[in-house]
Amino acid sequence: MIELRGMGRTYTRPNGETVRALSGVTLRIERGEFVAIVGSSGSGKSTLMNVLGLLDRPSEGSYVLDGRDAARLGVNEQARLRNEKIGFVFQTFHLLPRTSALENVELPLLYSDRPAIDGLGRRALEAVGLSDRVHHRPSELSGGQQQRVAIARALVNDPDLLLADEPTGNLDPRSAGEIMDIFRSLNRAGRTIVLVTHDAGLAAHCGRVARLESGRVVADGRLDPVAAGAGEAR
């Protein structure tokens, strides 16, 4: 589903300094995989996530998403592909504070080409166990519940790919475990998930771990399915 070939990303700071965030990244992710991208702060994880999510473009190399050369698409084409195929889950939830859980989940549908959207938001909330919190605002929800709303929002357009950036970083251990249970369930149902984290314990939930150091993939291996299923979020 995802293929990066010799992908690099270079930025130029306002002072003219060049920063090479990613260099020579070659990575192939098959449909239905659950992959953790791990690395310390500054290793290039967030830049890689931005490229995978079509929020940024490679400076070199290629990015093929579901058979399409995504890096060469125009801005409008990228936005359409992103809305159709990718769901995002962030560490800080990014929920609108004055709107209900249902309204937050339904927001991506405003930009959808789907002919019928009635009921999709409620079904997404049911999928994450929040059918009884439909009309609650974020301030009336726990951190774990807010992240469930964020996951439901990411799922409402039924994307093929789910990108999660430190999704349990603001949660207590119990809530983090519940969120990882949801991700594992989604993956078992066939969803492709790429999870960015610095936490080795969290990565142990995934079927495969790729490690970044200084913008390069230095290790990439699959985990034993039993071990991955027995991991404990921290």
Image (tube, rainbow, N blue to C red):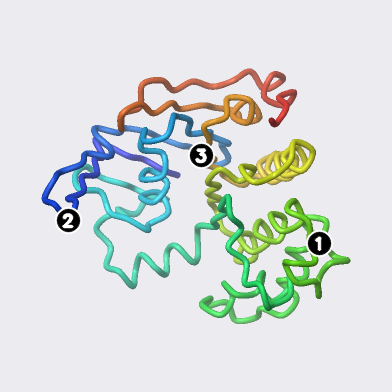
Secondary element at tag 2? loop
Which residue is situated farthest in the front direction here?
15
Residue under numbered circle 1: 126
Label 2 and label 3: CA atoms lie apart by: 28 Å
Quadrant of residue 121 within the rendered picture:
bottom right
Q: Earlier in the sequence, mark 1 or mark 3?
A: 1
Q: Earlier in the sequence, mark 2 or mark 1?
A: 2
Mark 2 residue type: Pro
Q: Residues within 10 Å of mark 2 (few under 14, many from 20)?
A: few
Secondary element at tag 1? helix
Q: Nearer the viewer, mark 1 or mark 3?
A: 3
Label 2 and label 1: CA atoms lie apart by: 46 Å
Residue 64, horizontal then vertical, whole percent: 34, 48
| Most foreground residue, 154 or 65 | 154
Q: Earlier in the sequence, mark 2 or mark 3?
A: 2
Q: Residues within 10 Å of mark 3 (few under 14, many from 20)?
A: many
Using residue 54 as the reference point, say whether residue 97 is left or right of it. Answer: right
Quadrant of residue 88 within the rendered picture:
bottom right
Residue at 56 percent across and 43 percent down: it is 166
Secondary element at tag 3? strand
Using residue 162 as the reference point, say whether residue 26 is left or right of it. Answer: left
Residue at 53 percent across and 33 percent down: it is 36
Q: Residues within 10 Å of mark 1 (few under 14, many from 20)?
A: some
Q: Nearer the viewer, mark 2 or mark 3?
A: 2
Mark 3 residue type: Val
Residue at 79 percent across and 38 percent down: it is 174
Q: Where is 28 relative to 175, above or below?
A: above
Label 1 and label 3: CA atoms lie apart by: 25 Å
Residue 76, horizontal then vertical, whole percent: 33, 73
Residue under numbered circle 3: 196
